[in-house]
Image (tube, rainbow, N blue to C red):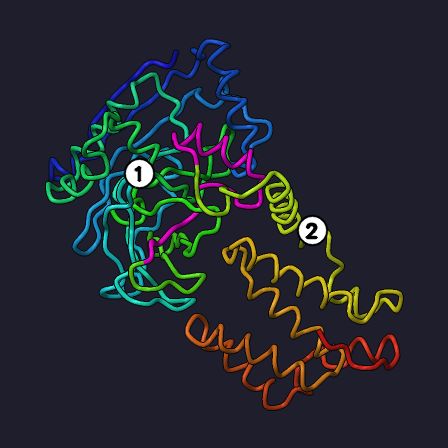
Amino acid sequence: MPSLNCTTTSNGSSSSASLTLSSSATQAPPPHVCARINAQITSNPALARPFFDFAEYVRGRSYIIRNLVFENFESSMLLDKGVEGMLPATFHPPRATPLHTFEIGDAGDRGRGMFALRDLPVGALILVEHPVIVAPYLVGLNVPLVDIYANLFDRLPHGIRIELSQLYDGTDHSLEDVIHLNALGIQLEVPDVPRPELTTHRAVFLNTSRCNHSCGPNAQWEWDISTFSLYLAVVRPIMKGDEITIHYTSCTRPRHERQAILRSQYGFICRCSYCNLPSEDAVHHSDNSRMALGHFWNSLPSFEGWCLDPTLPYDMLIKLHVEALRTIKQEGLQVLDAERHVDAIAMCYGALADTNMFRIWIERVRDANADVDPSRAVVFAKWLSNPTSFPAWSWKKTFCGRKKNVLV
C-alpha cells in the first residue's frame, strides 16, 4: 500500500498552515482492493472514467490540506496538488444570499431537513453558500480517511466546527461516514496529466447538506467554480412550511436502481411519493416515463433537421415537447429543465409562422428568464412584440411548403 510522507509549510498562521501528503510511486494496493474500487468508479457514469485503474491512480499522488478564507467564512480542503494549483488566486464575489427563505427543522424519520419560511416561486434563490469541507471523491493514500477528515475538521474555526457537528448529533456515524453521507458532488478543474484526478469532489455544506432527497425534488443546486459557491434555487412552487428537497441520484433511473444507489451510498430507503406508488403497474409506467425523459434529447431530431425535412410532420416536435412537459409535471421532474421544452415549442411555432401560438409560448420563455437572465428576457420581449424578427421565423413553411397552423 502507499506509504505516507508528510511535510508542513507554514504561511504564518497555525490554523492556515498547509500540509502535504504523498503516496509511494511504486507500491500498489492489494488486487482485491483495486478490483473493488475499479468496479465502483467505472460503473458510475457521473464520474466519466470507464477505464479507471486504481493501481495506477495511487502511484505518486500528492495532496495538499489547506484552508480557504472568504469574507466571514473559512473552508478546509484536501486537494490533489495539481487540482489545488488550478484554483484561481481569488474568487469572484457570489450573489447576495436572500434573507428569510428557509429554516432547519425536524423532518421526522428523515432526521433534520430544510423548510420554507415563506412562499417561494419558481426560479427564486433560496441560498448561496461556500462548502465547509472539500475532499477528492477518492483518496489514494494509505492513511485512514477518518484521520484525514479529523484534520480537516480541526482546521475549521470553532463556530463552524459547532455547526458542522450538528450534522451528526445523535448518530453513531463516524466523521468519515458523516462526510460521505452529507457531501454533494462538485466539479473542479483537473490538470491534463497521466493518472489525472477525478473531477468530482465531495463537498459538505452547512445548510444544503441538510436538504433531504426526493425523486421529484422541488429545488436544485448548481455549483459555480468562479465564486466557489453553491446556489440553491426553486424549480417548482414551494409553499411556506413545505420541506425543500433535492435529488441525490439521477431521477431518470428506474425505481429499483434509485433505491439501490440510495441504500448503498446514503444508507436509507426512499419513501417519497414518487417511489411509494400504489401498484407494480404504476411503478412500471413511472420507470418508463422517467427513462424516456432521460433519453429524450438524444433521440430527438434537431430543430434544423425538422425544419428542412419535408417528411417530418409539422406537429412532430411540438407534440413530443408537450408530452415531455406533461411527463415532467406528472413525475415531479422540473429539475430536468422544463423551460428548455417551452423554448423549443416556441421555436417550432415560430418556424411554422404561427403568430398567436408563438406569442403564447415565447411569453412563457420571457417570463421564465425575467429574473434569471434579464438580457435574454429583453430579446424574447422583442420577438413577442415583433414575431417576424425571430431568426427562424417561417423556416418550416419556407423549406417544406405551406400547411395549416398546428394547435397543441
Q: Nearer the viewer, residue 237 or 190?
A: 237
Looking at the rendering, in which quadrant would you find the C terminus?
bottom right
Q: Position of residue 407 (x, y in %)?
A: 73, 77
Q: Does the magenta-highlighted stretch encompass residue 305?
A: no
> In the displayed structure, would residue 186 be above or below residue 224?
above
Q: Which residue is mark 2?
A: 298
Q: Position of residue 48 (x, y in %)?
A: 56, 37
> In the displayed structure, would residue 182 be above or below residue 175?
below
Q: Position of residue 142 (x, y in %)?
A: 34, 16
Spot the residue most to the front: 278
Q: Amino acid at mark 2?
A: Asn
Where residue 25 sits, quadrant-wise, is top left
Where residue 358 sits, quadrant-wise, is bottom right
Mark identifier at residue 331: none
> Neighbour class for label 1 at 10 Å: few (<14), some, many (≥20)?
few
Magenta region: 242-269
Q: Which residue is mark 1?
A: 109
Q: Amino acid at mark 1?
A: Asp
Q: Nearer the viewer, residue 257 or 66?
A: 257
Which-is-in-front pick, marks 2 and 1?
1
Instruction: Say which residue appears at 67% left-offset and 63% top-offset.
Output: 321
In space, the residues marked 2 and 1 are separated at their CA atoms by 39 Å
Instruction: Say which residue appears at 50% left-offset and 42% top-offset.
Output: 275
- Name the element at disc 2: loop
